[in-house]
Image (cartoon, rainbow, N blue to C red):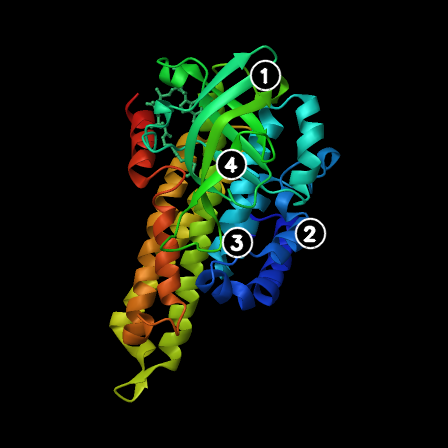
């Protein structure tokens, strides 16, 4: 489907594919097994412009478009889904809201370090009792003089351990749910801010998933992002873009699964011939390839719509829903084609399956994507 890409996008795809195969692939096993955060890769991706790929050069970005970002996250995730989500959560969930809703002063202060990868970003929306119901946020922010005092705790913050800049949502008008939430930019060295529990996860083990504790955390008034009580919409608009990052990550996992399944089925002999000769295997590969291409086209379409300035919320939900379910489907088939070997750690199939599952859950479960899509269809 490269014919849908511009010359610049094709060149970028080749460059990242080569880099990911040479530099990220050899580390992917260590990243997974040792829960290793690939600091050196993040640094190099920053130097290559990938941590700020879709942002203007005046703030230190690479000045490319969102389709380029979508391609980059897929190519990285083809070899390592942990690295894919580190880039995606940083770029979509932190750089994007600061770029879109930040004051000029906030953009000048935060974006150059974030877009170059010198600083890592993390997004804090979820709480223990505010998951899919993100409007149920209990963390509060109270204005005292010229400072916001924030209290509460957040869960499941991707990059939470390594990040030095957080975009965090808190209730500024408790009881008003979605109409009483505001967004804040918080530096990790702010007094009253600390990291709590680090989650041990089934997959994407190289990316940290942290609890954030805010105990009378005092944030300067100027760190409010956007308007007071308008933070829920900022979060939703941010997640529209984030969901495309996760779609790209899922596509990378799906492609890895397909490529490994094809290679293995050509090498593995049973009944005196490669198992690729059997129709049972051929049909699995046909289904995987067809599902992957359908999902890719949905992701490309929504990314293109974002670049064109169109409303793409529903299309982003469709792309994320499809790509995440295709990633799990392809990873499951890949493991099946590997048979007993696929169930061992000697092959990558089991990692793909573990990594794929989260794409159906974070940045909105498949059920929430269906809710977003059906609301648009039925309105
Ligand atoms: N763009 C702009 N505005 C939007 C919007 C969007 N995509 N979605 C909703 N809104 C607006 C609505 O228009 C509405 O505006 P008004 O008040 O002016 O009418 C307002 O926001 C409230 O919307 P809803 O009434 O639809 O709100 P809701 O309470 O019914 O919730 C929801 C809607 C879709 C279920 C939402 O809560 C949701 O997306 N939940 C899932 C949360 C999620 O994805 N969490 C992931 C966290 S990040 C993560 O996973 C960790 C990580 O680091 C990777």
- Residue in the image at 61% along x and 13% along y: 146
- Residue in the image at 29% along x and 65% along y: 284
**Which of the two discs, 3 and 1, sits closer to the camera?**
1
Q: Nearer the viewer, residue 361 or 5?
A: 361
- Residue in the image at 47% along x and 14% along y: 229
Q: Quick one: SS at disc 3?
A: helix
Residue of label 4? 194
Residue 186 vs 293, above or below: the answer is: above
Residue of label 3? 83
Residue of label 1? 147
Q: CA distance from mark 1 to mark 2?
A: 37 Å
Of mark 3 and mark 2, the one earlier in the sequence is 2
Q: Quick one: SS at disc 1?
A: strand
Of mark 1 and mark 2, the one earlier in the sequence is 2
In the rendered image, is residue 201 in sight? yes
In the rendered image, is residue 63 in sight? no
Of mark 4 and mark 2, the one earlier in the sequence is 2
Single out the residue that lies furthest toward the right.
58
* Residue 115 screen position, x and y as percent: 66, 40
Q: Quadrant of the C terminus?
A: top left
Ligand 1 falls in quadrant: top left
**Which of the two discs, 1 and 2, sits closer to the camera?**
1
Of mark 3 and mark 4, the one earlier in the sequence is 3
């Amino acid at each position: 489907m490269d014919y849908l890409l511009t010359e610049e996008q094709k060149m970028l795809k080749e460059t990242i594919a080569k880099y990911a195969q040479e530099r990220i692939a050899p580390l992917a096993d260590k990243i997974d097994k040792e829960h290793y955060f690939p600091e050196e890769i993040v640094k190099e991706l920053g130097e290559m412009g990938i941590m700020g790929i879709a942002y203007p050069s005046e703030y230190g970005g690479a000045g490319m478009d969102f389709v380029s970002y979508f391609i980059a996250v897929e190519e990285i995730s083809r070899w390592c889904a942990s690295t894919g989500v580190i880039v995606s959560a940083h770029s979509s969930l932190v750089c994007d809201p600061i770029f879109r809703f930040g004051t000029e002063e906030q953009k000048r202060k935060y974006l150059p370090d974030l877009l170059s990868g010198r600083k890592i970003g993390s997004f804090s929306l979820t709480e223990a009792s505010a998951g899919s119901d993100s409007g149920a946020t209990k963390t509060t922010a109270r204005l005292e003089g010229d400072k916001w005092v924030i209290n509460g705790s957040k869960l499941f913050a991707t990059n939470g351990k390594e990040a030095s800049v957080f975009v965090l949502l808190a209730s500024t008008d408790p009881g008003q749910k979605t109409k009483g939430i505001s967004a804040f930019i918080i530096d990790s060295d702010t007094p009253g801010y600390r990291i709590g529990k680090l989650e041990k996860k089934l997959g994407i083990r190289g990316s940290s998933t942290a609890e954030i504790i805010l105990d009378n955390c005092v944030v300067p008034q100027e760190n409010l992002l956007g308007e007071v009580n308008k933070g829920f919409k900022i979060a939703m608009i941010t997640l529209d873009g984030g969901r495309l990052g996760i779609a790209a990550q899922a596509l990378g996992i799906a492609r890895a699964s397909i490529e490994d399944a094809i290679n293995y089925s050509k090498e593995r002999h049973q009944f005196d011939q490669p198992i690729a000769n059997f129709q049972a295997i051929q049909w699995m590969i046909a289904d995987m390839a067809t599902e992957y291409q359908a999902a890719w086209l949905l992701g490309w379409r929504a990314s293109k719509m974002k670049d064109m300035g169109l409303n793409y919320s529903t299309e982003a939900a469709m792309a994320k829903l499809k790509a995440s379910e295709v990633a799990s489907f392809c990873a499951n088939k890949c493991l099946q084609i590997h048979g007993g070997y696929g169930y061992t750690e000697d092959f990558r199939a089991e990692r793909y399956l573990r990594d794929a599952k989260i794409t159906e859950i974070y940045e909105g479960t498949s059920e929430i994507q269906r809710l977003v899509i059906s609301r648009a269809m039925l309105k």
